[in-house]
Amino acid sequence: MANCLIIEDSEVIRFVTQRIFKQLGHKGFEAETSEQGMSICQSEDIDCVFLDWDMPHLGALDFLQAAFAHGKFSGEIILCASENDPQQFALARAAGAKFHLLKPFDAMSISAVLQQAGIETEGAEMATKEAVAKKA
């Protein structure tokens, strides 16, 4: 079980992502702001962060720079973006986010990016079936 943090200003996206973390067998944390996310990273043993690119106040690049400064964070950071912008991804990669995920995402896409980051997941297929059933 991994400790996963979603930093996202949308309450709905945080709620859905938390459910997916749980369905995949992980413990979820959430932060509405980058500052709250930084605080959680410092107080908890976070394995991966799902970071919204378009955050108010402290933006994604500022968060990345602060997270990796002086070895404060050793987990994986996955950039979450609404737009498929290669320039954003290149900037984030250069700042330490090795992976990205386009919104809207589901259990299968979260599971896939976690596996790319070396974090095992369970129940991705079941989580996706449940999500499809709820849409019907």
Image (cartoon, helix red, strand yellow):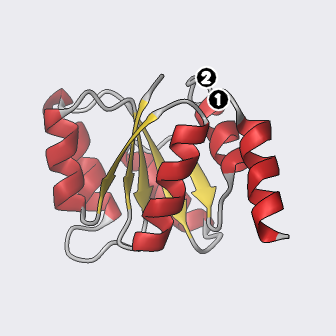
How packed mark 1 is, by other alpha carbons closer than 10 Å (few <14, some 14-19, many 20 or more), is few
Q: Which mark is residue 120?
A: 2
- Secondary element under disc 2, as helix, strand or loop, is loop
Front one among 92 and 134: 134
Q: Is residue 65 left or right of residue 120?
A: left
Q: Position of residue 37 (x, y in %)?
A: 24, 52
Q: Write the residue at 33% across / 53% down.
A: 30
How packed mark 2 is, by other alpha carbons closer than 10 Å (few <14, some 14-19, many 20 or more), is some
Q: Position of residue 50 (x, y in %)?
A: 45, 50
Residue 28 visible to an observer of this rendering: yes
- Quadrant location, the C terminus: bottom right
Q: Is residue 112 left or right of residue 48?
A: right
**33 lies above or below 43:** below
Toward which corner of the image does residue 35 lie, by quadrant?
bottom left
Which is more foreground, mark 1 or mark 2? 2
Toward which corner of the image does residue 7 lie, by quadrant?
bottom left
Query: Which residue is the site of mark 1?
Result: 115
Front one among 107 and 87: 107
Q: Position of residue 14 (x, y in %)?
A: 43, 62
**20 lies above or below 59:** above
Q: Write the residue at 25% across / 32% down.
A: 73
Q: Earlier in the sequence, mark 1 or mark 2?
A: 1
Q: Write the residue at 44% across / 54% down.
A: 92
